[in-house]
Amino acid sequence: MISSFFKKLLLSRKIEIEDGEFKVFDKNFFLGSLRSFVFLREEMKRKNSLDTLYKFGEEISKEIYDYVKKFGGRKEEIFRFWLNMTNLAGFGAIEIIEVKDKEHVAIINCNNSPLAEYYSKLGKKDKVDEILAGMIGGFFSRWFGKHVTCEEIACVAKGNRYCQFKVRG
Ligand SMILES: [Zn+2]
């Protein structure tokens, strides 16, 4: 099955895969396998630099947010685009449980993080979604207009039923 978001991008020629380039709205992206990403994560864990993965996630979301905003996207449109891009990038389907704009807090679930499912099959018991946490933190830093952090408080890789993320200022 192909997501309707991807179909829309294809039909409106907003996605280009040609001559060694993968572009969405003129922005270059690259694809990597989940297995190679696990290798990268294990290397970073060994070097005590998992926080870099979080910052990497933050950058991804801030760039998407700023890009859509530059073209006049309203907050709701930016939000929907970000959700679709997160989905398209293979990080799992994100579900917003609660957002409190005034308090700068939010609870987000991800029911099917492919990374967490991969790790749970290896029998490891640890939370593993630093990039996704960073992506959520980066997005809500823009959304609230204030730097917030995001912590993964439940993870499928730890044996929880879903991954859950808590955003706070
Ligand atoms: Zn997780």
Image (cartoon, rainbow, N blue to C red):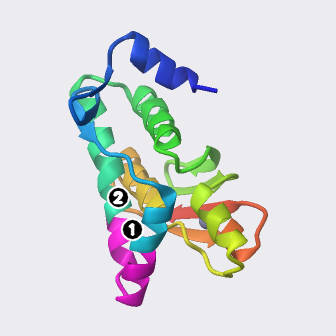
In the displayed structure, would residue 167 be above or below residue 40? Answer: above
* Image quarter hosting the N terminus: top right
Name the chief secondary structure element in magenta. helix
Task: Reply above or below: 43 against 110.
Answer: below
Please report the bounds of the magenta region as a residue range: 41-55
Q: Quadrant of residue 146?
A: bottom left
Rendering coords of residue 88 (x, y %): 49, 37
Mark drawn on residue 82 = none
Mark 2 in CB contact with mark 1 (< 8 angstroms): yes
Picture residue at 76% right of the left edge, 69% below the top:
160
Which quadrant, please, contains the C terminus? bottom left
Q: Residue furthest front?
A: 19
Mark 2 falls on what kind of element? helix
The amino acid at mark 2 is: Glu
Residue annotated with mark 2: 58
Some atom of ligand 1 lies within 8 Å of the CB belonging to the residue at label 1: no
Residue that appears at 42% across and 55% down: 135
Per the image, the residue denoted by label 1 is: 54
Q: Residues within 10 Å of mark 1 (few under 14, many from 20)?
A: many
Looking at this view, is 76 or 37 the one in front?
A: 37
**Residue under the point 23% across and 36% down:** 20
